[in-house]
Structures are given as C-alpha cells and as structure tokens.
Image (tube, rainbow, N blue to C red):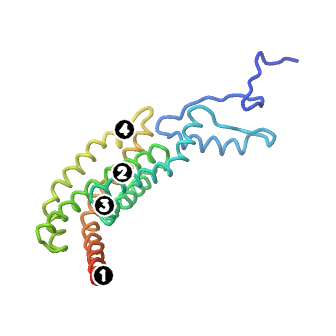
Amino acid sequence: TTTPPQINHYNRFRAATIEGSPASGVSLGDALTTLENLAKDVVPAEMNTALAGQSLEFREAGQSTLFIFALALSFIFLVLAAQFESYIDPVIILLAVPLSLVGAFAALLLFGLDLNVYSQIGLIMLIGLSTKNSILIVEFANQQREKGMSIVQAVLEAGKLRFRPILMTAFSTVFGLLPLALATGAGAASRVSLGVAVVGGMLVSTFLSLYVIPVFYVLATSAQTRLMKRFEVSEE
C-alpha cells in the first residue's frame, strides 16, 4: 500500500483542495453554481464540499449586499432630510432608486447576465447616481415655490430648466461606464456585469424620472400642503 506524503485537513476533516479560475467570459458566480451542481452529481454522499478563499469571500459578500443596500438608502434619506428639512422631499428623491433598479434588472436580463456580486455593487452605485437627477428637480421646484409659483408651475419650470443639466450628467456617467459594459478578454465578466447594471439603470432612471418625479412631487406636496392647512385650522 502507498500513502500520500501529506494529509491536508479543512475544518478538522481530511480534505483535498481543487483550485481553478473561471474561463474567459464566465463570471465567478456562474462558475461556482456549475461546480456545485456538478458536485451534487459526482461527489459521493459520505463526502462534503466547501468553498474557501476568494470563492468563499464572493459568496459571503453577496449575502451581505441586501444589508448594505438598505444601509445606503437609510443614510441617504437622513442626509436628504437634514438638507431639505423635510421628510417628503427625500421620499420623492429616492423614488428614482426603484426606477433605476428596473432598468438595471432589464439590462441584465437582456444581455443574459446573472445577479452576481459585481452587478450588486452596480445596484448600490445606482442609489447615489440615480438620485442626482431627482435632487435637481426637487431643489429647483422648491426655489420656484418660494418665489410665489404654484406647485404645478414650479415643477414644470424645474423640469424645463433642469432638463439639459440632467441629460448632460446622466449621459456623461453612461459614456464613462460604457468601456466596462463593453469589456472583453480575461476577467471581463465582472466588469461587464457592473457596467451593464449601472448603464441600464441610469438610462431608464433618467428618462422615467423626468416624468415620474414631477408627478409624484405634485401629488405629495399638494397632500402635504392640505394637511398643514387642516392642522392650522384645527389649532385655531
């Protein structure tokens, strides 16, 4: 009989290590899913498999993305609430986030990409990028209302005067991320996932927010104004 020169252990069990890297054009998430499915068919029932190294870090990072996403939304809401001294305006501004998520998921689906850790990073980036357009509209509309304009007139004027700056900032972001979305070669899968998610989210969010944000601003601000008037009347 022969014995191996060295017996390795992992988590106190005898273990054999298999190392590798994804093929060109294949994301790490797809590679791990393929390996796990293969292990279910090939590995005997008395043996177990476990991830280690970068693969383990990849999976753990993916599980914590939802918490990071919620934390980012909370921080942005608090900052906007302090800046605008209102709880309604931050809600209106953050409405751009679900619009950007629709665009990101649609772009990933269109290009046949999965929701891996890199595309999840792109979703977190969209929280900050997509709200810039809403901030321009809401801030300028508030300034016009202070000058005596009605709610509808103020938001229409904001949409007209901020239309070009919104398109300029959005398209500069999109064109800056196109090299990532169109990347090729080794390791391109991670860059493509991030780029496609952000580009798709920015395009959809930009055009939809030009219509959705003003409408929601009118509805929310009008409701807030009516409630404040009723509260003042009840106090009198």
The residue that mark 1 highlights is 235
Give above or below for 31 relative to 203: above
Q: Secondary structure at mark 2?
A: helix
The label nearer to you, 4 versus 2, is 2
Q: Kindly indicate whether the residue at mark 3 contacts the one at mark 1 (C-beta within 8 angstroms).
A: no
Q: How many marks?
A: 4
Amino acid type shown at disc 2? Leu
Q: Earlier in the sequence, mark 3 or mark 4?
A: 3
Q: Secondary structure at mark 4?
A: loop
Q: Kindly indicate whether the residue at mark 4 contacts the one at mark 3 (C-beta within 8 angstroms).
A: no
The label nearer to you, 4 versus 1, is 1
In the image, 183 versus 201, the foreground residue is: 201
The residue that mark 2 highlights is 126
Location of the C terminus by quadrant is bottom left
Whole-Å distance between the Cαs marked 1 and 3? Answer: 31 Å
Whole-Å distance between the Cαs marked 1 and 2? Answer: 43 Å
Q: Secondary structure at mark 1?
A: helix
Whole-Å distance between the Cαs marked 2 and 3? Answer: 13 Å
Whole-Å distance between the Cαs marked 4 and 2? Answer: 20 Å
The residue that mark 3 highlights is 93
Mark 1: few/some/many CA within 10 Å (<14, 14-19, 20+): few
Left or right: where does residue 61 sit relative to residue 152? Answer: right
The residue that mark 4 highlights is 183
Location of the N terminus by quadrant is top right
Q: Earlier in the sequence, mark 1 or mark 2?
A: 2
Left or right: where does residue 219 sit relative to residue 185? Answer: left
Q: Residue furthest left?
A: 147
Q: Earlier in the sequence, mark 4 or mark 2?
A: 2
Q: Secondary structure at mark 3?
A: helix
